[in-house]
Image (cartoon, rainbow, N blue to C red):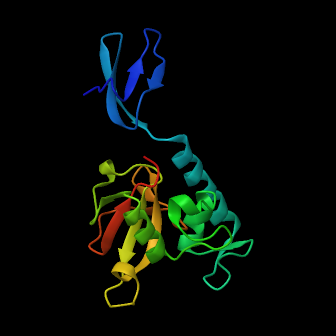
Amino acid sequence: SWKKSIATVSDTGVVTAKKCGITNITVRVDGNSFVFQVEVVPQRAIDARGNGYNIMYSSSYSQARRMSVGYYDCSSLVFRAYGCDTGLLGGIPTWAPTAASMASHLERTGKVISYHGLSASQLRIGDLIFYSAPYNNGRYKNIYHVSMYYGGGYRLEKPLRYYYPEGNIVMIARPIK
């Protein structure tokens, strides 16, 4: 169903975003109907997705060198993708927080949308998915990994990986609402 609070369509077919969310728009042409799903997300989340993708495919994975040019790990990838924004993700401008510290910061700042896996249809581009270890690793909620939702059912991993609501997801946060 079409939610005009999310997007509107002009008489000439121009779609205008109104607020974040997902809606279906039905187009009727020559007696045929076509339904298109429209997702409205903040430009900053779209930019973070693109930044993350570019960092990931122009660099090598290394926890030891995570903040060095040409390298990344999961949390430094997310941190850099969002422009090293310490107010948004925690840390300090020159050093990314761990995935666990990032999750703790997002919880303190009211950005958590779930404490378990959600269906992909409930996620938005730029959402952060936190995974826990099956053992006590001494970190917040035993978190050992963070991944960004890429959109279209995928998460930002090298290579892009299909997202599914695994049992070890302990938190999903939406840094940009």
Classify residue 51 by image quadrant.
Answer: bottom right
Classify residue 132 by image quadrant.
Answer: bottom left
Seen in the picture, residue 171 relative to 123 is either above or below; the reply is below
Towards the viewer: 16 or 163: 16
Residue 52 appears in view: no
Classify residue 84 by image quadrant.
Answer: bottom right
At a point 64% along the width and 77% down the height, the residue shown is 66
Residue 117 appears in view: yes
Marks counted in the figure total 0
At a point 41% along the width and 54% down the height, the residue shown is 174
At a point 46% along the width and 41% down the height, the residue shown is 41
Q: Position of residue 106 (x, y in %)?
A: 42, 63
Towards the viewer: 23 or 81: 81
37 vs 80, left or right, is: left
Q: Position of residue 89 (x, y in %)?
A: 51, 63
Q: Where is residue 99 in the image (x, y as percent from the top left)?
A: 48, 74
Q: Position of residue 117 (x, y in %)?
A: 28, 64
**Where, quadrant-wise, is the N terminus in this rendering?**
top left
Towards the viewer: 55 or 27: 55
Seen in the picture, residue 1 relative to 83 is either above or below; the reply is above
Seen in the picture, residue 93 relative to 143 is either above or below; the reply is above
At a point 44% along the width and 76% down the height, the residue shown is 100
